[in-house]
Image: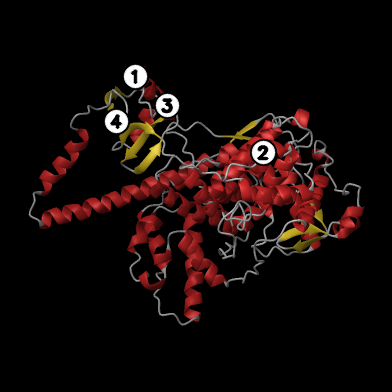
């Protein structure tokens, strides 16, 4: 087996050509499929899947030969460990723990007080590394000892951030254990080969726990495994993960106000790092690099520059117009076409189409009738592949690749969830549009013969290989990466609806931060009022009456400034949902304002322990009211 794989690897040796992976010339002579070893649980894998991957790499090579390179190849200088960890602390919103502002870390005290034990350990590890590095460089900065901060928290209470006892967290997690599959590994020599995931998922469904920190779940699972209580398995099937019902409402990316989303991103980075730490996976965040790129055009243009161009044409655009048009052109030809995405357009024709698009797209004079369906698919992949910075971002591309090394499918999904949250808005929105399109292709697999694994194999090289990073590795490792990145692509497609969900434990941590900051602000205000000789009790009385004056217990007042009935008092019941509140308002509308449509109206939770949050229809209002009794309730449209 090892000999066969080694021989195969030599046949499919990958080299670098202008930032793209290319196959050796030998490849064109090899027609037989790779002798990829399969376990009995992999019988449903399409035999041509791996061949699709190598064929796509060959197409990339041909494409690069016929394209003029518009960007410089950059060799990235590997930063030292201290620089990496310093960058990590900045990205986690903890830059004031070091540097010139380190002498006053009070700004981060509230933030640190909401962290779980694993999150705190991840922060502490990075602060200590930065501290040691700065000492070596004879920096005069004072680094606070975060162990003191966390020690104070442990002395005050042995509770998780959401207020539940640590033991309760473990008990709650126990019900989720034993439901996840343990990914089996195929050993190639001394390396581990991630097997291809089969097409069909098992009939059983598994709830994915979003209430408990992922890293804490991993710790509890490891501890249970030591006790012999963790059920082990070698099933490689993809579980049908589902979201459990959350009565306070599911929060999705785009539902939170920017100031709260920023806090979520800080926490997501810390949580991802903690999860990788617990599982013993190295997570090296890559520093963004500056690459000389085009400042206009369609291909080889940074996403942000492209969107700035597009927004001048179509205000509010979140996904590049050329990207949208290529998808619509493919769909116009019908998604039942056999080999869609797999069969490439002619390289010379693709090159000519690119040049013509660059000249005529924004003028509106390009003849789209001349673009064949397979050409449009090739152009779409070319667009993704030639982004100066990868769609999965320079900073986190290696972290996405490392997902294949996590031991269980559940943990892989959890890591991908956090990584999607961490992507810049433009990358995340474009990735979402791409994955939704790929799912529509797969929905027609009976006719187009493009299963999820076929699509994953074709798209993985275009999404995971980037000139901006040093991705050189051994031939054997490159072979492993082929299956690994295709499996990650598979997960991104299959679980895309789950990946755009913000875990409840992160939202709860944001709520706690907001509550603590509010208490701090109130204390400062009371102090100020006292200094100004106002009566403190009078202030507190006014403060209380402002919230409770016109609303009886068990009743909320909902505001709808854009509707004819601008306000309504609504009695809370056990079964009242956000959709019911909307329905009551809309039933009294003779005509909604011309600028609004019914499907564009949402109920928002504003203030209290959250900045602003758009509620999903299945939110139970009484449960949410108990979680945030000081919130205001407003019906409005979502900002574009």
**Cα distance in 3D space between marks 3 and 4:** 15 Å
Determine the secondary structure under disc 4.
loop
The residue drawn where x is 29% and y is 23% is 564
Name the residue carrying label 2.
Answer: 368
Q: Earlier in the sequence, mark 1 or mark 2?
A: 2
> Image quadrant of residue 280?
bottom right
Q: Quadrant of residue 242?
A: top right
Residue shown at the point (36%, 50%) measured from the top left? 513
Element carrying mark 3: loop
**Nearest-to-viewer mark from 1 and 2:** 2
Residue underneath mark 1: 589
Closer-to-camera residue (512/139): 139
What x and y, as percent, mark residue 570?
A: 30, 23
Find disc 4 in the rendering and name its residue: 561
Placement of 526 over or under 444, stated as above or below:
below
Q: SS at mark 2?
A: helix
Q: Circle 1: is it few (<14), some (14-19), or many (20+) Cα within 10 Å?
A: few
Residue at 69%, 38% (x, y): give it: 238
């Amino acid at each position: 087996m090892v000999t066969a794989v080694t021989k195969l690897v030599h046949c499919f040796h990958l080299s670098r050509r202008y930032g793209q992976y290319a196959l050796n010339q030998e490849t064109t002579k090899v027609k037989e499929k790779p002798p990829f070893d399969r376990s009995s649980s992999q019988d449903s894998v399409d035999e041509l899947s791996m061949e699709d991957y190598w064929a796509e790499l060959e197409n990339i090579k041909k494409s690069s030969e016929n394209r003029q390179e518009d960007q410089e190849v950059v060799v990235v200088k590997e930063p030292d460990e201290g620089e990496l960890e310093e960058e990590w602390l900045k990205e986690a919103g903890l830059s004031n723990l070091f540097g010139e502002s380190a002498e006053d870390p009070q700004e981060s005290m509230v933030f640190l007080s909401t962290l779980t034990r694993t999150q705190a350990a991840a922060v502490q590890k990075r602060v200590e590394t930065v501290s040691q590095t700065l000492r070596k460089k004879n920096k005069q900065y004072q680094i606070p000892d975060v162990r003191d901060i966390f020690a104070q928290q442990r002395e005050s209470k042995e509770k998780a951030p959401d207020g539940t006892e640590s033991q309760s967290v473990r008990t709650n997690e126990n019900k989720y254990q034993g439901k996840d599959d343990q990914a089996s590994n195929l050993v190639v020599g001394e390396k581990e080969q991630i097997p291809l995931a089969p097409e069909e998922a098992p009939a059983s469904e598994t709830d994915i726990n979003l209430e408990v920190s992922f890293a804490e779940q991993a710790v509890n699972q490891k501890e249970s495994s030591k006790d012999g209580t963790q059920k082990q398995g070698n099933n490689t099937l993809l579980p049908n993960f589902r979201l459990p019902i959350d009565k306070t409402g599911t929060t999705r990316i785009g539902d939170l106000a920017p100031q709260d989303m920023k806090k979520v991103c800080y926490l997501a980075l810390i949580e991802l790092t903690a999860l990788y730490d617990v599982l013993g996976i190295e997570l090296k965040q890559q520093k963004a690099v500056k690459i000389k790129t085009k400042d206009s055009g369609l291909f080889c243009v940074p996403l942000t520059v492209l969107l700035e161009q597009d927004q001048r044409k179509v205000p509010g655009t979140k996904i590049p117009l050329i990207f949208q048009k290529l998808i619509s052109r493919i769909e116009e030809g019908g998604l039942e076409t056999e080999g869609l995405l797999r069969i490439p357009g002619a390289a010379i024709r693709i090159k000519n189409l690119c040049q013509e698009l660059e000249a005529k797209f924004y003028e509106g004079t390009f003849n789209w009738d001349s673009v064949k369906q397979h050409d449009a698919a090739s152009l779409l992949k070319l667009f993704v592949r030639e982004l100066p910075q990868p769609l999965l971002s320079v900073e986190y591309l290696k972290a996405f690749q490392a997902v294949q090394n996590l031991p269980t499918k559940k943990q892989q999904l959890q890591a991908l969830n956090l990584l999607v949250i961490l992507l810049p808005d433009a990358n995340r929105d474009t990735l979402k549009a791409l994955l939704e399109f790929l799912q529509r292709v797969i929905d027609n697999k009976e006719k187009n013969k493009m299963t999820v694994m076929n699509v994953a194999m074709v798209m993985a090289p275009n999404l995971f290989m980037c000139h901006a990073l040093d991705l050189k590795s051994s031939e054997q490792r490159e072979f492993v990466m082929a299956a690994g990145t295709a499996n990650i692509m598979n997960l991104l497609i299959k679980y895309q609806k789950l990946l755009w969900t913000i875990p409840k434990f992160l939202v709860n941590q944001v709520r706690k931060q907001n509550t603590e900051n509010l208490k701090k602000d109130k204390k400062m205000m009371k102090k100020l009022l006292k200094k100004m000789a106002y009566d403190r009790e009078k202030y507190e009385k006014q403060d209380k009456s402002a919230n409770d004056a016109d609303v009886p217990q068990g009743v909320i007042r909902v505001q709808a400034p854009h509707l004819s009935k601008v306000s309504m008092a609504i009695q809370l019941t056990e079964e009242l949902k956000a959709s019911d509140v909307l329905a009551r308002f809309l039933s009294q509308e003779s005509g909604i304002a011309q600028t609004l449509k019914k499907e564009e109206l949402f109920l928002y939770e504003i203030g209290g322990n959250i900045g602003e949050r758009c509620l999903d229809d299945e939110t139970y209002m009484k449960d949410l009211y108990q979680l945030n009794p000081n919130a205001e309730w407003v019906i409005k449209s979502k900002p574009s």
